[in-house]
Image (cartoon, grey):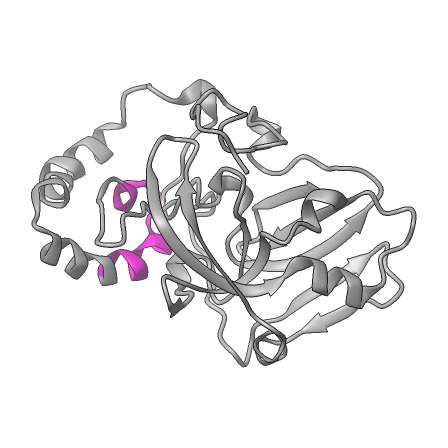
Amino acid sequence: MNEDVPEGVKEGPPAERGTPVGRRVFLGTLALGALGVVAAPPLQRGLEGFLGSAADKDPTGLTGLLPNGGGFRYYSVASSVPRKNADTYRLTVDGLVDRPTTYTLADLEALPQTRLVRDVQCVTGWRVPDTPFEGVRLSRLLDAAGVRPTAKAVRFTCFDGTYTESLTLAQARRADVLVALRMQDKDLGHAHGGPVRLYVAPMYFYKSAKWLSGITLTDEVRPGYWEKRGYDIDAWVGRSNGRDDEPTS
């Protein structure tokens, strides 16, 4: 999952879960992983800065075994991810639309912002309660682009060059789906998918694609990266993957 599967390590599809970790990861865990597990919260927060800078450089997945002060784990399906800033970031909206558009980070920041506070639930079982996200409602960008009647779904691509996701058009228009610029009352850092990520509040976190760079209207749902590897396309928390029995709103 792009992050979520949360952030910085490469995690296999469902059939691969539960297999022994490799010797390199195991030895690394002995040296560092135990420290992350037993460390006091202040030390964990100290590690967070290291994890944020290292998450995109660790193809072994070791950084994902270390907890941090925010309660997130770091995952990526790419061995490295380029960094984008206000000067280099671009988000395109295209496909079955009347007005294809490219947004800079400043463009997105200038639009009305929505703040949501929800639990983040990963399909692998961890949860971060009461997590604030802020950003532009995806529906606003869709309306601005002029969605054509033939469009039935939205495909998301990411500047890691690998990860993809999809929603039906009805799902994408929900008020609790954001193109997010902030998380936990801070600008999105690189390790959390910044400067811009998707946030799909009512679904498992793998739907909330990090490092968002493209929004394409399509005539059908095109399964995303993890869905091609066995994850549910409709990932409502409590109603998919057999991971969570809680009802969703």
Is 137 on the left or on the right of 94, as rendered? left
Q: Residue 10: horizontal and vertical position, in percent? A: 40, 39
The residue under the point 50% across, 70% down is 84
Q: Residue 158: horizontal and vertical position, in percent? A: 58, 54
**Magenta segment range?**
50-64
The residue under the point 42% across, 21% down is 16
Q: Is residue 65 above or below residue 12?
A: below
Q: Residue 83: horizontal and vertical position, in percent? A: 46, 67
Q: Nearer the viewer, residue 194 or 24?
A: 194
Q: Nearer the viewer, residue 164 or 45?
A: 45
Q: Is residue 47 above or below residue 121?
A: below
Image mark count = 0
The residue under the point 62% across, 71% down is 90
Q: Nearer the viewer, residue 136 or 207?
A: 136
Q: Is residue 164 covered in magenta?
A: no
Visible residue check, residue 1: no
Q: Of all residues shown, which one is farthest toward the right?
A: 149
The residue under the point 85% across, 47% down is 151
Q: Residue 130: horizontal and vertical position, in percent? A: 36, 50
Q: Quadrant of the C terminus?
A: top right
Q: Is residue 235 above or below residue 163?
A: above
Q: Is residue 63 above or below residue 215?
A: above
Visible residue check, residue 173: yes
Main SS of the magenta part reads helix
Q: Nearer the viewer, residue 31 or 207?
A: 207
